[in-house]
Amino acid sequence: MFPDAAVYFGVFILLIPVNWLLEAVKWRVLLHRIGLSVSFSTALTAVLKGLAVGILTPNRVGEFLGRIMDIHPPLRPRGIMLSVINSLTQLLTTVSAAGIAWVVYRWHFSGIIQMVDEVLLPVGDMLMYAFVFLLFSAVIMYVVSAGKFVSRWGEKFSSLLKTVHQVGAFTVMKVTGLSVLRYLVFLVQYWLILRWFGIVDADWTGWILIPMVFFVTSVIPGLLVFPLDISIRGASAVLFLSPVCADAEAVLFASLMIWCFNLAIPALSGAALMFKKNEPA
């Protein structure tokens, strides 16, 4: 442990509410675009409820079910589309950050850590393909939603696509900016815990390797469900961080601690809020 361990852990704890407050702001901004003006507390409640449901599903795909619980039933399909947009902006941020980290490592640090080299090269290829796919999907979705290629899929499907267009490019950029801020908060949190455990030094290694961990844990757990995804998160952290830390148990415990504080505890709060009856927005 470092002498400043208490500071590392204290800042980590302080950033937990910041993480979810930013997510609540994103959700409130998106709801506003379909005519739902909700309070900040209502948006935060929806986010926590979504987390409570999503944590039990692969890659939290069921999160939208909790978020739309307090939305008026006729607007729930549009709420689902908003949740998809929100998730895509966060995923795009994760993929982009990992791609930048991979490029920086490849150009400036390649060869320093042999095991990381063996892992980062194929992961880097995955990142490039994933980024191109996401970008292409976003463009196609926006063009289709604009009505230029909306065919006879039915009024309901057309309405859902137009919801994407209704959000608008400016709002998407705004939500993406908030996604970047939230990513930076989580990145700093992860680095603080790793420093608290003495896993990384105050140099480039943590900032380069952590985005890779985020990328892998955003993709692989999508095939699994709780609690198997916890094992994958820990294994991914060990895979990328073991070259700079021989103590695999410390890496696993750090990963578990981050999961508990950033996901499990807020999810329990969301589960408790489900018992409180609210009027539909």
Image (cartoon, helix red, strand yellow):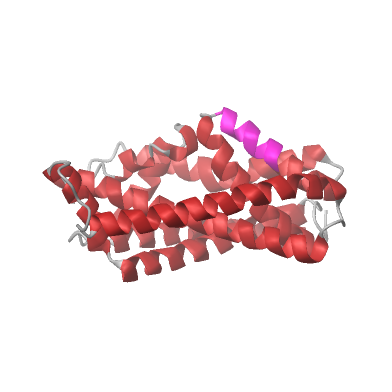
Residue under the point 34% across and 55% down: 140
- Image point (33%, 71%), residue name: 170
**Residue 228 is inside the magenta segment:** yes
Task: Point out residue 61 in the picture as x, y percentages from the top left corner.
Answer: 41, 38
- Residue drawn at point x = 86 percent, y = 49 percent: 114
Examine the rendered structure and indicate whether residue 7 appears above or below residue 267: below
Give the camera-side residue of 74 and 123: 123
Q: Is residue 73 visible?
A: no
All told, the count of numbered labels is 0
**Residue in the foreground of this view, choosing between 9 and 280:** 280
The single residue placed furthest to the bottom in the displayed view is 170
Range drawn in magenta: 227-236
For the residue pair 199 and 96, the one nearer the viewer reads as 96
Judging depth in this view, the residue of 92 and 262 nearest the camera is 92
Q: Is residue 8 left or right of 89 when viewed as pictured?
A: right
Left or right of residue 82, residue 231 in this image: right
Q: Main structural element of the magenta stretch: helix, strand or loop?
A: helix
* Residue 13 spot, x, y in % from top left: 59, 56
Specify whether residue 266 is in view.
Answer: yes
- Residue 266 is a magenta residue: no
> In the image, 217: left or right of 270?
right
Task: Please report the residue visible at 31 percent of the width from the left and 45 percent of the height from the top.
Answer: 67
Residue 185: percent from the left, percent from the top?
57, 62
